[in-house]
Image: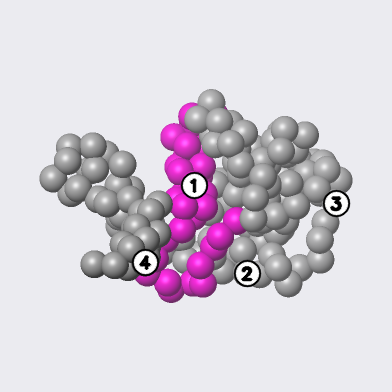
Amino acid sequence: MTMSAQRAIASETEGKVIAFPACPTAARLKPAPAELDDAQRVELDRLRWLALRSRLAPRPNLEKACFLLAAGREASLERISVCFFHGLSAHGRHDMVLYRPGAKAVSDDEIWLMRLLAAWRRGDSRAAGALVAWRVAPSHQRWLRFLAEGLSKALD
């Protein structure tokens, strides 16, 4: 083999990681595929539709909208979801990745959203607060916790 061929091979393989599937740590590092049952899939599709609808709605002032929602006895699912998804897009630490309704794949952000709603349904406000703190800027975490709790109640 010539020197130039050896350099070409070395530059191609440089920086590549070789997986060893038999290694016990490989199974721990590999992310598990998202397994959702039928009820969770239906709820996820419903959330995806609500997120799409919220893109068409006018952008509300988050703080004012939360005050109005808190004053009302029962707010509609659509009003809460519009405020929630607009709040996430405006004050999230990064853009949310939500797939189209009916997609079989599930994004990490959708898994986060499902875990957030499950925490509120269990009554675990500390876990829900931690999930919100992970994704939302500190100045708006209180409002997004309020909206997430309202969204979980409105979905039921």
Q: Residue 107, how many percent across, how many down?
A: 46, 58
Q: Residue at x 49, y 47 (%)?
A: 112
Start-end of magenta stretch: 96-125
Q: Which amino acid does the dot numbered 1 rest on?
A: Trp
Name which of mark 2 and mark 1 comes first in the sequence. Answer: 2
Q: Residues within 10 Å of mark 3 (few under 14, many from 20)?
A: few
Quick one: 151 or 108, which is closer to the camera? 108
Per the image, label 3 sits on a secondary structure element best described as: loop
Residue 128 % position (x, y): 54, 34
- Mark 1 nearby-residue class (10 Å; few <14, some 14–19, many ≥20): some
The residue identified by callout 4 is: 4
Please name whichever residue, 135 or 119, is drawn nearer the observer in this view of the structure: 135
In the rendered image, is residue 117 in sight? yes
Residue in front for this viewpoint, 134 or 122: 134
Q: Residues within 10 Å of mark 2 (few under 14, many from 20)?
A: some
Q: Tag 1's secondary structure?
A: helix
- Name the residue carrying label 1: 112
**Can you identify the residue that label 3 sits on?**
61
Residue at numbered disc 2: 52
